[in-house]
């Protein structure tokens, strides 16, 4: 059975990574969702996909250069539509509470960190995140993913008991995938749909890893990937792929 994973919540119908895209998931027969965690300059954890605040909030600049108190009241919804002006950025406390209340399984993507203070921030992110992840992992199924092998290795060193996924960018599925996956003891490889060829899927399965494919918003492609035996698909239109309760 191919898992349908709601990508940043129901992000086709509401602003991504906010309660407006998370809460409606409960109305559907969905059991997996994905979101992203990043860190502010003063070491607070915030759910944000982009390195910058510009696209999805009314603030600008790199998240890793902002103070938490300066951004936590940002409008994270108006960019999607005026009816979402009350949407706010979410924290790991918000995410933990949502998971506890819904019992939904979670794929949390660790954002890569750049900038002059990146090494210290990466260590802070790991140290702050681990207690949240242990709590969530005790309640639901949790997969930690990242495009950054360094972030995966750092978190794996701190919390080896968690389940890890190596993420590959479009056309970046490389021969070294087994080295990275083995180094962080990954159970999953997450592929861009352009790399989700029968050959790649078979090679990954032959090594005993599961394959989840992103971000597939075309229902025919979801059906095709299902016939190829992929284990999960990330989609912005999860509500179109499952039954409403
Ligand atoms: O984790 C799957 C997918 O979310 C990866 O792509 O761009 O959303 O980080 P992106």
Image (cartoon, rainbow, N blue to C red):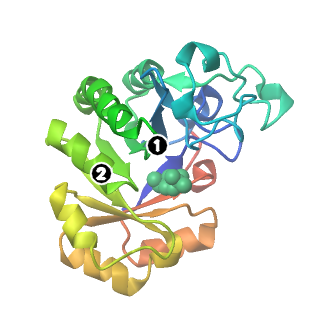
- The residue shown at (61%, 73%) is 220
Placement of the N terminus among the 4 image quadrants: bottom left
Q: Residue 65, percent across and down? A: 55, 30
Q: Residues within 10 Å of mark 2 (few under 14, many from 20)?
A: some
Mark 1–mark 2 CB contact (< 8 Å): no
Q: Is residue 112 left or right of residue 25?
A: left
The reply to whether residue 159 is visible in this rendering is no
Question: Label 1 vs label 2: CA separation?
Answer: 24 Å
The answer to whether 109 is drawn above or below residue 191 in the figure is above
Q: Is residue 115 left or right of residue 1?
A: right
The residue that mark 2 highlights is 150
Q: In terms of depth relative to the viewer, which is nearer, 12 or 16?
A: 16
The residue that mark 1 highlights is 33
Label 1 within 8 A of ligand 1 by Cβ? no
Q: Residue 71, percent across and down? A: 62, 20
Q: Secondary structure at mark 2?
A: helix
Q: In terms of depth relative to the viewer, which is nearer, 147 or 191?
A: 147
Q: Residue 208, percent across and down? A: 18, 69
The reply to whether residue 186 is visible in this rendering is yes
Indicate the quadrant where residue 72 lies: top right
The answer to whether 179 is drawn above or below residue 104 in the figure is below
Q: Residues within 10 Å of mark 1 (few under 14, many from 20)?
A: many
Indicate the quadrant where residue 101 lies: top left
Q: In terms of depth relative to the viewer, which is nearer, 110 or 112?
A: 112
Q: Residue 127, percent across and down? A: 26, 27
The answer to whether 95 is drawn above or below residue 149 in the figure is above
């Amino acid at each position: 059975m191919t898992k349908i994973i709601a990508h940043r919540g129901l992000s086709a119908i509401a602003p991504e990574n906010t309660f407006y895209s998370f809460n409606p998931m409960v109305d559907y027969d969905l059991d997996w969702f994905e979101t992203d965690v990043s860190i502010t300059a003063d070491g607070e954890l915030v759910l944000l996909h982009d390195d910058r605040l510009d696209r999805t909030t009314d603030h600008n600049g790199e998240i890793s250069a902002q103070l938490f108190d300066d951004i936590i009241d940002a409008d994270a919804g108006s960019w999607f539509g005026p009816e979402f002006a009350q949407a706010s950025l979410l924290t790991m406390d918000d995410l933990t509470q949502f998971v506890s209340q819904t019992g939904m399984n979670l794929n949390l993507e660790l954002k890569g960190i750049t900038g002059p203070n990146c090494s210290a921030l990466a260590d802070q992110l790991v140290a702050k995140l681990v207690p949240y992840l242990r709590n969530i992992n005790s309640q639901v199924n949790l997969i930690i993913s990242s495009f950054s092998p360094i972030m995966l290795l750092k978190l794996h060193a701190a919390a080896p008991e968690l389940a890890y996924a190596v993420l590959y960018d479009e056309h970046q599925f490389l021969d070294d995938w087994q080295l990275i996956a083995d180094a962080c003891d990954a159970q999953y490889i997450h592929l861009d749909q352009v790399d989700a060829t029968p050959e790649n899927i078979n090679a990954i399965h032959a090594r005993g890893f599961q394959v989840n494919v992103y971000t597939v918003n075309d229902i025919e492609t979801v059906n095709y990937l299902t016939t190829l035996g992929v284990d999960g698909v990330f989609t912005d239109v999860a509500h179109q792929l499952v039954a409403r309760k």
